[in-house]
Image (spheres, rainbow, N blue to C red):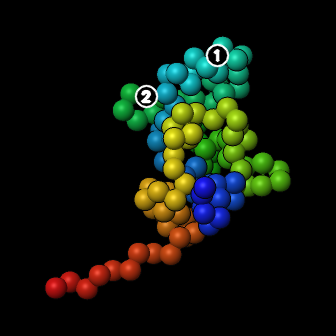
Amino acid sequence: MVPEEFDCEHCGACCHQRSGTILVEASDLVRWKRAGRTDLLDAVEPGHFGLDAFKMKDGACTHLGTTENPAACRIYPDRGTVCRAFEAGSQQCREFRRDRGIEPPLERQPRA
């Protein structure tokens, strides 16, 4: 169980990235095509490493935010594999949270 402080539905820090970095796997494209989700296919652009990625809007994934909750994912049940695999509370999660000012900065250790 994920600790309450890492509630993804009220965070969204990992969704705030540079263009081309929230990658979409080929299997996601196939899944969305089979499901007739052209809206999701239209929200993909060329990304880093020759892969596809979600389009960005105002520095965040185009799917971030609902009328009720600006940190919620509008496509959560159909989100991509990379998003599904992202672990709440992981080191990368905490780094993204620090970048957004959600997580306290790391304390610097004195040099010996």
Q: Quadrant of the C terminus?
A: bottom left
User: Dot 1 surroundings within 10 Å: few (below 14), some, or many (20 or more)?
Assistant: some
Q: Nearer the viewer, residue 25 or 51?
A: 25
Secondary element at image label 2: loop
Which callout, 2 or 1, points to the residue nearer the camera? 1
Q: Is residue 64 above or below residue 101?
A: above
Residue shown at 57%/39% (left/top)? Answer: 84
Residue 111 seen anywhere in this rendered image of the structure: yes
User: Residue 50: image x %, image y %?
Assistant: 38, 27
The answer to which image quadrant residue 88 occupies is bottom right
User: Dot 2 surroundings within 10 Å: few (below 14), some, or many (20 or more)?
Assistant: some
**Residue highlighted by disc 2:** 51
Residue 49 as seen in the image, left or right of residue 112: right
How many numbered discs?
A: 2
Residue shown at 61%/44% (left/top)? Answer: 61
Residue 59 seen anywhere in this rendered image of the structure: no
Q: Is residue 60 above or below residue 46?
A: below
* Res 33 label: 1
User: Tag 2: residue type?
Assistant: Leu
Q: Nearer the viewer, residue 67 or 109?
A: 109
